[in-house]
Amino acid sequence: MRLMALREEVCRANRALLDEGLVTWTSGNVSGRDPETGLIVIKPSGVMFPDLTPENMVVVDPDCNVVEGDHGASSDTASHAYVYRHRPDVMGVVHTHSNYATAFAAVGRSIPVVLTAIADEFGCEIPCAPYARIGDQRIGKTIVDHIGPSLAVLMKQHGVFTIGSSVEKALKAAVMVEDIAKTVWLALQIGDIEELPAEEIAANYERYSTRYGTADASRNE
C-alpha cells in the first residue's frame, strides 16, 4: 500500500474513534502497517482528533524511528510496533479508553461470551491482561502474550487494545467491544449472567465468519 493511502485510512480511523464516542480529548490512537515496506502510520502525540489530517500522521519504522512527520509519534507507538513485530497477521491496531470496556479493565475482569453478538464478533471471551506500565514495549508484549484468539484485549487499569488484519477491522473490533461491554454491564445490573456453551460459541462464530452476508446465510442482521 502506498503510504499516502495508508495515511488517509489511519487518519479516518482515528477521527472515527471520536465520532463513535470511544475517546476524549487526545486519548487513544489508531495505527496501520504497510504490508510492502513494514512501515507504520500512527496518530501524532498530543494532537486533538478534529485537527488530524493525513499529512500530520507520523510514519515510523518497526523500531519506532520516525521516518516522516513533523510531530512526535503517539506515546503508545512502542506498544503498537511490538504487536506488529510479533503478529505478522496484524495490519491495524487501535487503542481506546472507551467507558464500558475500560470499566471492566479497571476491575481486572474479562468479558465472557454471554451474548451471540460476542460469539459472532470475537468467538471467545474478551480477556483482561495484567497491568503493564505505559511508555515502552511492555504493553505490547502483554497484548501479544494475553490476547489469544481474540481481536480485543482489556489492559488492567488502563484501557482497550484491538487488532485486525486491516485498519478497518481493528476499528470495528474497538466499536464492537465497547458495545458489548455496555450491554453486559447493563445485564449485570439486572442479575446474574450465563456464558454460552462452547459449542454454541463455535457455531455462531463459524456462521458469522464464513456465511454472514452471503446468499446461504441462515440469517442476516
Image (cartoon, rainbow, N blue to C red):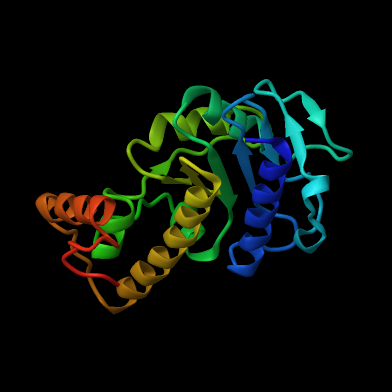
Q: As drawn, which residue projects farthest toward the right?
A: 70
Q: As drawn, which residue projects farthest toward the front?
A: 215
| Quadrant containing the C terminus in the rendered view | bottom left
Q: Which picture quadrant has residue 77?
A: top right
Q: As drawn, which residue projects farthest toward the top?
A: 63
Percent position of residue 2, x then y: 68, 36
Q: Residue at x 32, y 38 (%)?
A: 149
Q: Which picture quadrant has residue 76?
A: top right
> From the viewer's perspective, is residue 139 above or below residue 194?
above
Numbered disc total: 0
Percent position of residue 214, x then y: 26, 60
Q: Residue at x 65, y 50 (%)?
A: 9
Q: As drawn, which residue projects farthest toward the bottom?
A: 190
Q: Residue at x 60, y 33 (%)?
A: 79
> From the viewer's perspective, is residue 212 above or below residue 75?
below
Q: Nearer the viewer, residue 153 or 176?
A: 176
Percent position of residue 185, x then y: 38, 69
Q: Residue at x 66, y 33 (%)?
A: 40
Q: Is residue 115 visible?
A: no
Q: Nearer the viewer, residue 163 or 2?
A: 2
Q: Nearer the viewer, residue 109 or 181?
A: 181
Q: Is residue 49 visible?
A: yes
| Quadrant containing the N terminus in the rendered view | top right
Asked whether, in this view, residue 152 is left or right of residue 213, the answer is right
Percent position of residue 188, x then y: 31, 71
Q: Which picture quadrant has residue 134?
A: top right
